Image (cartoon, rainbow, N blue to C red):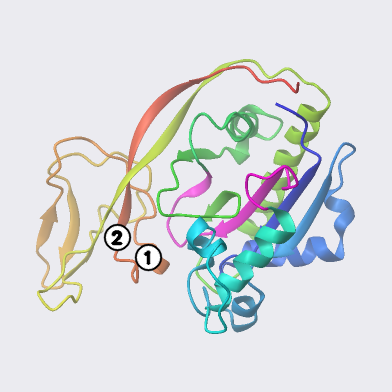
Amino acid sequence: MTSEHRVAVSGGTHGNEMSGIYLAKHWLRNPMELRRGSFAVTPFLGNPRAIEKCVRYVGRDLNRTFTTEFLSSAEAEDKPYEVVRAREINQTYGPKGSAQAFDFMFDLHNTTANMGACLIVDSEESLLPMHMCHYIQVGPAPDLSTRPALGQGPLRSAGEALELGPQPQQVVRADLFTQMRDLMACALDFIELFNKGTVFPAFEIEAYKITGRMDYPRYPDGEISAMVHPKLQDKDFLPMNPGDPIFQTFSGEEILYEGDTTIYPAFINEAAYYEKKVAFAKMEKHMFSIPGLQRE
């Protein structure tokens, strides 16, 4: 694996997730904070129009727009703004998979769910981000421990997504802002060590693999008929066993988990997922053996 010379950091892919937005704005004013000896870091605002309105998006979800379908479709004046913006980002920092693409991109997000810090990675075979996550877990600031979640499914982010929560939409919290800032500093320090030829030995790591999504119970007309059960609320990444209560109807009745295996839900009661008909993401917990890593 060759060295990483050009790194980009996107804040505000969603215009109401404020930690990344204000960090990107801070770094645009203070770029020296991101500087490392062996590579350059370019911060940018992902969705300026949504940021201006303090909404998730103005036309369609930018985070689901970095697909071949949208990036290669014919130009048209009636395309949603996010399609145009995805193409701009792809041309500036990509094209994805090309020789001129940036070597690494961070995509900063907040979630209203009680997920702590989570790095969403394509798969356990993505060695650099897996080693980065392990470095953050055992490195100089272990209190920044970050879970890896594997498999973006329908997510089509421009880069590796760093999720921090819980944080309400349209709100910036100093504690999560500081945590995200410190996590980014640690991640950039890891890339610097990698570029200098540091040998990172093999290790085992616990990771959560996205396997599906659970919708809310609904009336025949499509309206939600139940809410996340109090015993499930805020229990992201904790085991859900068959027979556990997961929903509570508005009249107070419990709805139990009918699966036949233990799962580990995440993004529980995420505010932005009501429109996507997702009450939580289903996750499996695995232990992965990650081979050693060194720059070629």
Residue at 52% of width from left, 84% of height from top? 78
- Dividing the picture into quarters, in which one does residue 17 lie? bottom right
Residue at 81% of width from left, 40% of height from top? 5
Q: Please name the amino acid that badge 2 sits on.
A: Ala
Q: In the rendered structure, are the residues bearing label 1 and label 2 in contact, judged by CB atoms less than 8 Å apart?
A: yes
Mark 2: which secondary structure?
Answer: loop
Viewer-closest of 179 and 70 = 70
Where residue 66 appears, as percent x and y from the top left, is 54, 59
Where residue 132 appears, as percent x and y from the top left, is 64, 33
Viewer-closest of 203 and 243 = 203
Write down the region rendered in magenta.
95-120
Q: Which residue is disc 1 drawn over? A: 273
Viewer-closest of 224 and 294 = 294
Residue at 74% of width from left, 63% of height from top? 44
The numbered mark at residue 279 is 2
Q: Please name the amino acid that badge 1 sits on.
A: Tyr
The numbered mark, 1 or 2, whose residue comes first in the sequence reads: 1
